Image: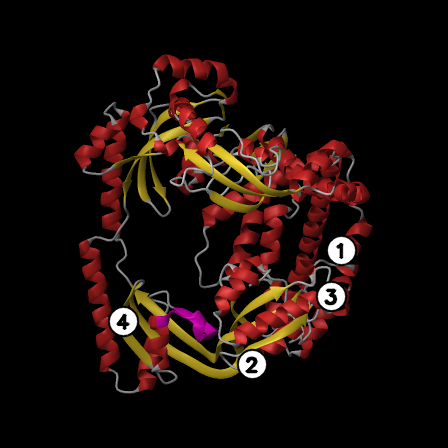
Amino acid sequence: MGAITRIRQVSPYFLGFVAALFIAFMVIQDSSFTTISQTGNSAERQEIATVNGDVITLADYERRVRDVLELQRQQNPNQEVDDETVRQQVFDEMVNEVLRKQQAAKLGIVVTPQQLIDVMMINPPEQLQLFKDSSGRFDIKLQQELISNPDRLAELLAQQKMPDEEIQRQLQQWKQTIFQIEDNVRSMQLQQSLSATIGAAASIPSIAAAEVQYRTDNSTADVQFVALNIDRVPDAAVSVSKDELTAYYEKNKEFYTQKRSRALKYLVFPQLASAKDTINAMKQSQRVAETLAALSTPQQKDSAFSSMMPTFNGVTTDFVMVNQVDPTAVTVLSSLAQGEVFGPLNTPAGITYYRLDGRREGVNPVVRASHILLPFSTNKDSAKAEAQKLMARAKKGEDFAALAAANSKDPGSAAQGGDLSYFGKGRMVPEFENAAFGANVGDVVGPVETQFGFHIIKVTDRQTTELKFSQFVIKASMSTATKQQIIVRAQKAVDEITSGTPIDVVAKKLEVPVQETKLFTADAPVLSSRELTAWAFDSEKGAAIRKDVKYYGMVVAQVTDTREVGIKPFEDVNEKILLTLKQRKKLDKLAQDAKALAASFGNDTTVSATTQSGVKNNGSLTGFGGEFSATNAAFTAPVGTVTGPIRGERAWFVIKVASRTDANMAQFTKDRPAVMQNMATRVRSQAFYAWFQSLRENSAIEDLRNKRN
């Protein structure tokens, strides 16, 4: 357990620095690493990767992996950590960090000591607000004290009467954590500086571009339209010749670029327990059940259960709300007295035995609530009036979920009918928390004003019961003999494929289905396996391998196709071109019908027009997307007139413009500085990520993990 997690127990005023902070930094900024240019054979010097000539060492990589794995295990002690996924995430972000450092050096960007002080001590972002008081408010004084004077921690631990040896150990861990926080902040600041620099260079829109965007965003039209969709024409009614396909390819092949890619065929030999293994597990469970049944007192059963826990890798779950426990387990545990044992019970995990270790009420109550949020926007009184109207409707019994979905401006919860799930005290802002915990289940309260706006809150459940329990599971596990049989069978397949027998023939002989991947790139691990992907890119067409792949089993794979950087061959894009040319020919066949439709629009009662209000010139019409020629007509045709047939991408359109509201360009002239600034901000937010993706794709990155001795 890391220092921060331990310190969390020191005082009710200290909530700790959760693992999520480090993981978030890993996704965007990364912790720093120090030795990226040494070479040699020791772990400290051995190369794990090179990035434009700079080296990432094995020691730095393994340290980073170890830290992230430890933090994830602290965060979720009862959940299995996916080691391979963590390793790939760490590797990718260490590469990204080197690239950022290289680019920062080229641009002369540095992070000053004062910047670090500002972030860590004076104005920390929310994820760096490490210390909270009992009401959940950030205690900046305590944070400044423990970061600037780490030895103060020893005094706090001593007040808890902790042994001196443990105090010194935790103090040392806390000091190491401070250095790690500083590294994270430095990397975060470097990221922000790079993003600002790249964004500034790419975010100077022209007045003409801003004017076009403003006109598009602020012009609307109400229309009626009829569409002749190409689906009216069956595929059999059009044909495309091989010459037409190849001619189109030759004319447009420059647009069909490809990255380096591979394709595999593979067989999966599931690593499952055999029938014999299952019988052995059932016998084992029977012995456990007989042992417990033979004991006469609850105390004896409790003691026997404790002795069995290590044997079966049992897990103890500390006090947790019943809503967070599997319903089957809740049903069992709710019927037990403290210390009582129950089992066997068949569960999806296996044959399970439970013991209730404790039950308590009201210590950490949680409520489940839904809400409707109306931000203040520019008119606070108007928002409040609207909130009061919705409150009255909810009080009268209207479906709260429907009201939230239609009116709440909190997109995340609105999509769930306003549901915020369960939360305890300290999770919400005080005004919201007080209203939710002060209401009864089923009550609707509000409007409640917070910094986010006005909330209408419905309390849907309340839980006060917490359970502490232990459990172990007896399940059929694959024996060594079973695993060896699977390995022998898979290796036989590899040997036959390597000797020249087609993988399809081998699969048929072994009665194993053969599966096939599409072409994949090195940055998209096949079967979620980085090692299998790396092998595929290091191997020639026809090579075969036997590999244990997590979540799949023993996999026998063969490289069946390879592609290098360049233009996609005709066979790779043939189907896509065929679809494009068929669509065009279907539109050609509908041309005369479209002309007749335009001539009879409004007079032919057999044709139903679609009415759509608030159309914008963004290619979107009801049922259609990407039809810019159609929406453009809504803003160029005279109001009240019917357009001629408009050829789109997948349909012909005939449109009547009922009314149109054009953008107020005089207002644009007045607001132009703000409009330009907003546009620049929007462009800037996208520029860095597009630039960085291109930078990574064009950098010389060599992954040496599979090539180490």
* Residue 323 is inside the magenta segment: yes
Query: Does residue 698 appear in the picture of this structure?
Result: yes
Q: Which kind of residue does numbered mark 4 sit on?
A: Leu
Q: Which mark is residue 345?
A: 4
Question: Which residues fall within the magenta stretch?
Answer: 315-327
Say the numbered circle drawn on residue 439.
2
The residue depicted at 65 percent of the width and 39 percent of the height is: 216
Tell me, for residue 143, which label it has, or none.
3
Asked if residue 284 is positioned above or below residue 206 in the image, the reply reads below
Q: Nearer the viewer, residue 705 or 379?
A: 379
Q: In x, y percent, where is residue 462?
A: 49, 78
Relative horizontal placement of residue 561, taking residue 450 as reference (left or right): left
How crowded is the residue under tag 4: few (<14 C-alpha within 10 Å), some, or many (20+)? some
Q: CA distance from mark 3 to mark 2?
A: 35 Å
Of the image marks 3 and 1, the number of the one nearer the N terminus: 1
Q: CA distance from mark 4 to mark 1?
A: 53 Å
Q: Secondary structure at mark 4?
A: strand
Secondary element type, mark 2: loop
Mark sitting earlier along the chain (4/1): 1
State the residue position of label 1: 119
Discs 1/2, front: 2
